[in-house]
Image (cartoon, helix red, strand yellow):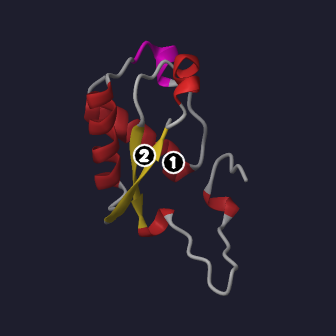
Amino acid sequence: MNIDQIANKLYEAITSRRQIRPLTQDNILLSDSDAYAVSRKLCELRKWKILGRKIGFTNRTIWPIYGVEQPMWGSMSASSISYAENGKSSIKLSEYCEPRI
């Protein structure tokens, strides 16, 4: 599977709000640069205007658990940010396959 195919598979799962098997169960292993390329393509497919980035895996003690060796960045768009007006915000849980709060 190439970068475009992987991004399309993820896009279909997101838009249909359905689970898919982890890519690793289908022997799809991505380098960090491959994963960032999939992320860029997924942002294109979602027609996201990137407003910023978030950082994950900043706690080095969990890196061995997840097999990572550095912090990772993710894109943020208007549709992925919820602003709190007067200290309150809401999101539509129906837009997610498995929402976590």
Q: Nearer the viewer, residue 87 or 75?
A: 87
Q: Residue at x 50, y 35 (%)?
A: 57
Q: Amino acid at mark 2?
A: Tyr
Q: Does the magenta portion include 27?
A: yes
Q: Residue at x 66, y 75 (%)?
A: 89
Q: Residue at x 43, y 70 (%)?
A: 78
Residue reaching furthest to the bottom: 86
Quadrant (top left, top right, bottom left, bottom right) of the N terminus: top left
The magenta-colored residue range is 23-28
The relative height of residue 50 versus residue 35 in the rendered view (above or below) is: below
Q: Does the magenta portion include 100?
A: no
Q: Are marks 2 and 1 in contact (CB under 8 Å)?
A: yes
Left or right of 20, for residue 34: left
What residue would you read off at disc 1?
Answer: 14
The relative height of residue 41 versus residue 70 in the rendered view (above or below) is: below
Q: Position of residue 35 (x, y in %)?
A: 34, 32
